[in-house]
Image: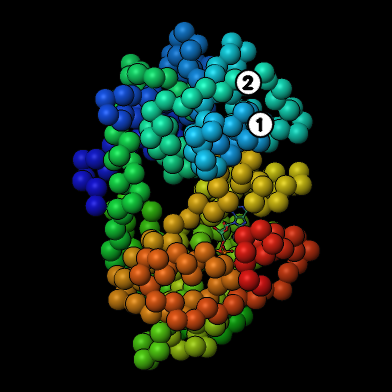
């Protein structure tokens, strides 16, 4: 677990980035100062970078989309790439580099020059912080300590912060629920809420029934505001949620972990950006990549820890996603069986489901 005083600074840094304030990340005496492109404006940029020397830090995924000569060291899509700042790259054009929504209408022509990313560990941590903050993974970046930055975080603390989070049960209560509007009432269910060392996000478990000697039927459901609450037809989340609860009820003992990992871990706003790209013809995987993210940024160790707190070691997992099975197994959970969760496609989510099958290895 990260010490409190270190975690405090990281939490402040995530908050600062969301507000458009600069931060610095250090590694072995070297410092990188950063201003999130998405939250920069002309005034903030001028104050942060009066001499117009700050370069632009992007993820390798986004850099590849922009046809920037890829930094050879950036082996994976979530690694940083540094684009040399030329005088014509102002705030608006930096945003166009970071935000793919205008890619088709206003293709970025360059010329662009890439240079070796300095203090790579700090740069990589910055991209991770952007994802945590739900921002586009792009920064104005300067070597050295910016006077404007009041927070300096060692890169290693950020790595530890993401690795070492613990969860504990904070509250539990009886929670009778109904399956759909006129569906069957489930009376023997309860909700368990967790607190989390790493952030203020509250994950929950819904438990139906009681231990009966069998491993429980478990569903890992990642938050989907659009599908879970508004009945979006673009994905299968709403129907999956309800079907999972029904199967859990029928099985006599089930646990649904409701993980607050909106948009496969990129946050609501970035997911909606991905939706808008999908309206331009990109599929769900390519949309994430165009934004500069990996296809799936979720970490299922969190789910394993929640199961641990519930003293569950063996499960039957309801999923079509082999990564969830693998992720839980790696984290020490014995997945004795995978149970499929079949949803009838509709005209709006058919292509999405096919992409998950064809490109993300979902077993449908
Ligand atoms: N980034 C992004 N996230 C999406 C998109 N559509 C749905 N999601 C998110 O994907 C997550 C839903 O995934 P899950 O149903 O938990 O899991 P899965 O990977 O589909 O695997 P299953 O267990 O088989 O359902 C939610 O967090 C949704 O918000 C999309 O087009 N882009
Ligand atoms: Zn959804």
Left or right: residue 361 compared with residue 102: left
Judged from this view, the residue extending furthest toward the bottom is 212
x%, y% of residue 285?
A: 64, 51
**Which quarter of the figure is the C terminus placed in?**
bottom right
| Quadrant of the image occupied by residue 158 | top left
State how the image is colored: rainbow
What element does badge 1 sit on? loop
Q: Say which mark, if any, is on residue 66.
A: 1
Residue at position x 35%, y 18% in the image: 144
For residue 175, say whether it is visible. Answer: no
Q: In the image shown, does 87 or 348 lie closer to the viewer?
A: 87
The reply to whether residue 37 is in sight is yes
Q: Give the answer, above or below, for where 188 lies relative to 228.
A: below
Count neighbours of disc 2 (C-alpha within 10 A) and say few if under 14, some if 14 to 19, many if 20 or more.
some
Q: Which of 146/75 is in front?
A: 75
Task: Check disc 2 and report the residue beneath it.
Answer: 112
x, y (%) of residue 174? Answer: 37, 77
Contact (Cβ within 8 Å) of mark 2 with mark 1: yes
Residue 362 vertical position relative to residue 280 in the rendered view, above or below: below
64 sits to left or right of 316 = right
Residue, x 55% and y 80% (percent of image)? 339
Residue 72 placement (x, y as % from top left): 54, 33
Residue shown at the point (29%, 66%) measured from the top left: 169
Q: Give the answer, above or below, for where 44 lies relative to 97.
A: above
User: How many circles with numbers are drawn on the protein?
Assistant: 2
The residue furthest front is 72
Q: Residue at x 44, y 57 (%)?
A: 299
**Which quadrant of the picture is home to ligand 1?**
bottom right
Give the class, few, some or many, for how many residues have Cα within 10 Å of label 1's Cα (few <14, many ≥20).
many
Q: Indicate left or right for 194 with 61 as reference.
A: left
Foreground pick, 10 / 119: 119
């Amino acid at each position: 677990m990260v010490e409190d005083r270190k975690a405090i600074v990281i939490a402040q840094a995530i908050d600062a980035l969301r507000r458009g304030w600069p931060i610095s990340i250090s590694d072995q005496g070297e410092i990188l100062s950063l201003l999130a492109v998405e939250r920069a404006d002309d005034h903030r940029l001028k104050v942060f970078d009066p001499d117009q020397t700050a370069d632009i830090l992007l993820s390798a995924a986004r850099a590849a989309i922009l046809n920037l000569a890829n930094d050879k060291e950036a082996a994976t899509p979530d690694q940083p790439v540094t684009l040399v700042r030329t005088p014509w790259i102002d705030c608006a054009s930096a945003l166009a580099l970071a935000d793919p929504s205008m890619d088709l209408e206003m293709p970025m022509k360059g010329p662009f020059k890439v240079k070796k990313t300095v203090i790579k560990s700090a740069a990589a941590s910055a991209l991770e912080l952007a994802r945590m903050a739900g921002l586009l993974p792009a920064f104005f970046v300067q070597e050295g300590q910016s006077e404007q930055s009041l927070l300096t975080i060692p890169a290693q603390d950020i790595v530890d912060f993401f690795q070492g989070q613990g969860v504990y049960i904070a509250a539990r209560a009886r929670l009778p629920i109904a399956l759909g509007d006129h569906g069957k009432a489930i009376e023997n269910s309860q909700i368990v809420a967790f607190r989390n060392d790493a952030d203020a996000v509250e994950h929950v478990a819904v438990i139906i029934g009681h231990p009966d000697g069998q491993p429980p039927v478990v569903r890992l459901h990642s938050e989907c505001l659009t599908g879970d609450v508004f009945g979006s037809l673009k994905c299968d989340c709403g129907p999956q949620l309800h079907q999972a609860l029904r199967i859990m009820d029928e099985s006599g003992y089930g646990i649904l972990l409701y993980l607050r990992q909106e948009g496969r871990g990129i946050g609501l706003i970035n997911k909606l950006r991905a939706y808008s790209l999908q309206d331009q013809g990109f599929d769900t995987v390519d949309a994430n990549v165009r934004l500069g993210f990996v296809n799936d940024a979720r970490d299922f160790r969190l789910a394993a820890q929640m199961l641990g707190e519930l003293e569950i070691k063996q499960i039957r997992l309801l999923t079509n996603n082999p990564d969830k099975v693998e992720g839980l197994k790696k984290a020490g959970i014995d997945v004795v069986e995978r149970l499929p969760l079949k949803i009838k496609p509709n005209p709006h989510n058919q292509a999405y489901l096919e992409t998950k099958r064809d490109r993300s290895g979902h077993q449908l």
